[in-house]
Amino acid sequence: MFQILDVMVNFESNCSGLDSIIRVIKEGVFPIVQIAIPIILIVLCTLDLGKAVIGSDDKENKKLLKRIVRRLVYALILFFLVTVINLIFTMVGSITENETLIRWSNCWNYPMEN
């Protein structure tokens, strides 16, 4: 009745079956976080700046400028977050002697290699 899918996992590989998930994160999620979201935030900043230029209320302009600065800071944080995560995983594997941490670092850096 029910067919069970047998998944062949190579436990000698770096990732022990997680290589496809890591590839999706590194090639799918991270580019969106690193590129698309900061672009959206910058576009929203441009719209807010346009509102501030058109509007004549100084109190409202100060609120819009604070929002613009906050969004630009968020865009920078998101852009560099991916780089920091990659750097941490690479450094952990190179400075430790713990075999488990080295394996996780290798999984992150080289997910498809055995």
Image (spheres, helix red, strand yellow):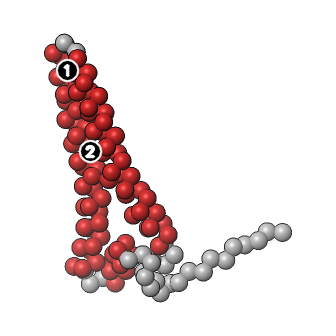
Q: CA distance from mark 1 to mark 2?
A: 22 Å
**Quick one: which residue is furthest to the right in this view?**
1
| Percent of width and height locating residue 97 | 26, 84
Which quadrant is the N terminus positioned in? bottom right
Q: Nearer the viewer, residue 48 or 74?
A: 48
Which of the 4 quarters of the picture holds residue 8? Answer: bottom right
Is residue 100 in view? Answer: no
Q: What residue sits 35% from the left and 45% below the top?
A: 37
Residue type at mark 2 is: Ala
Q: Is residue 81 left or right of residue 15?
A: left
| Percent of width and height locating residue 100 | 36, 80
Mark 2, residue position: 75
Q: Is residue 12 left or right of residue 64?
A: right
Q: Tag 2 or tag 1, which sits nearer the N-term? A: 1
Q: What residue sits 30% from the left and 36% below the top?
A: 43
Q: What residue sits 72% from the left and 72% below the top?
A: 4
Element carrying mark 1: helix
Element carrying mark 2: helix
Mark 1, residue position: 53
Q: Residues within 10 Å of mark 2 (few under 14, many from 20)?
A: many
